[in-house]
Amino acid sequence: MPEIRPFRAWRYAQERHDLTPLIAPPYDVIGPELETGLRDRDPHNVVRLILPKDKAGAPGSRYDVARAELESWASAGVLAQDAGPAFYPYRQTYRVAGREEASRVGFMGLLKLEPFGASVMAHEHTLEGPKEDRFRLLQATRANLSPVFVLFQDPGGEVQKVLAQAMAGPDASRAARPQGERDEMWALSDPAACERLRQAILTQPLVFADGHHRYESALRYLESLRASGKAPGSAESMLAFFAPAPQPGLSILPTHRVVHSLTEDRLAGLEARLGQFFQVRDAGNSKNAGEVHRWEQEAPGKPGRVLGMALRGKHRLLELTLKPDAAEQAFAHVPRPLQELDVTVLHEAILKPYLGIGEAELSAQTCVRYLHESMEALFELEGDAQAAFLLRPTPIESVFKIAGAGLRMPQKSTFFYPKLATGFVLHRHEA
């Protein structure tokens, strides 16, 4: 059974209820321009901790820079630790293009670390580079600066009832983001209410939505402490956001694939060769945003396994529908729950057999880029990209089904939107 508990969070000084200048998105979605903007916004923006910069002439010093910044902010009172343990209800209000405004609710707390298995389940594979980076940052700062994101089933709605009561209070920290999202967080310190939350989750397995890299890095750090004979203290747990399901505000967006840097012979005649496994249909002009977005809106309702594809120089969006008997030919070796995913179809029936892009290339990202906006992916065809593949969102039911079967999706199979804000609460390890 998963073990969760309230904790004494480190937060920005309580007189600052508007945290807009101080928060940031997760490190892995911050590009250079946004990073510069966040640094300029406030000298204590959390981006300085999660994406520290090396000292001049000292490569690799950025992790020590983050540790020094964190210690300095705590000493100066920029950050302060709450007086008592609490869970932290968190609500994000947002809008996805073409949909009505929605709110996703959950709460922050500590999750005891254990290998992925029956009670804490992963749903997708990870990449090696980010894990090493996050391990070194954790090792230096001895703090969870960003939460992992886990889902659990709340069929009776008990957790959402407790959260609704807590979020009715006025004392929220809040932030606004450029995309129009609103983040709000409360502190729930009432022992009885905290115990209701803990008990409601006690028998529910947790499924990771986001943060696999950070969780695996935290496990490695914990193992390193134990191996060295050091007492891990609160490093046995890590900061997590717990989101009940089902709820209307759980949105998953697709992650598209852009292929580049292949020799031309690997792409020659691709469209014709795809007829072996797919029914191919012209779905519109790939440079016309209106036609592309119309296909995106219609595609989730189409039966079977469906992809979009565009090739450099063709300016056409093609719809690929897997033929009924193709799965047995193309990927009979893949467990059946994974066969149902569009991303599996892309990897096993196109990238591997036709383009020669295997697991090593996908993991190293040597010839595949991952993008969330369809037109951004298609625009890459004007540059070095040779092919763009558009995916439909992965259903939330598939996330639970595949994790529950002990399987993992290919990396970058899901994009839970919006991303959690970093900076509302931090967990510094205690002895």
Image: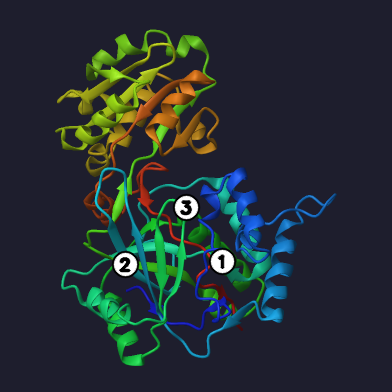
Q: Secondary structure at mark 3?
A: loop
Which is closer to the viewer, label 2 or label 1? 2
Q: CA distance from mark 3 to mark 2?
A: 20 Å
Q: Secondary structure at mark 2?
A: strand
Q: Above or below — where is 126 with respect to 382? A: below
Q: Look at 49% across and 30% down and name the residue there.
A: 368
**Horizontal side of residue 313 vs 192, given as left or right:** right
Badge 1 crowding class, 10 Å Cα cut-off, few under 14, some 14 to 19, many 20 or more, is: many
Q: CA distance from mark 2 to mark 1?
A: 20 Å
Q: Amino acid at mark 2?
A: Val
Mark 1 = which residue? 145
Q: Look at 54% across and 81% down and name the residue there.
A: 14
Q: Which mark is residue 57?
A: none
The one nearer the camera, 243 or 25, is 25
Q: Quadrant of residue 375?
A: top left
Q: CA distance from mark 1 to mark 3?
A: 22 Å
Q: Which mark is residue 105?
A: 2
Q: Amino acid at mark 1?
A: Leu
Sequence-wise first label, 2 or 1: 2
The one nearer the camera, 103 or 349, is 103
In x, y percent, where is residue 126? 47, 48
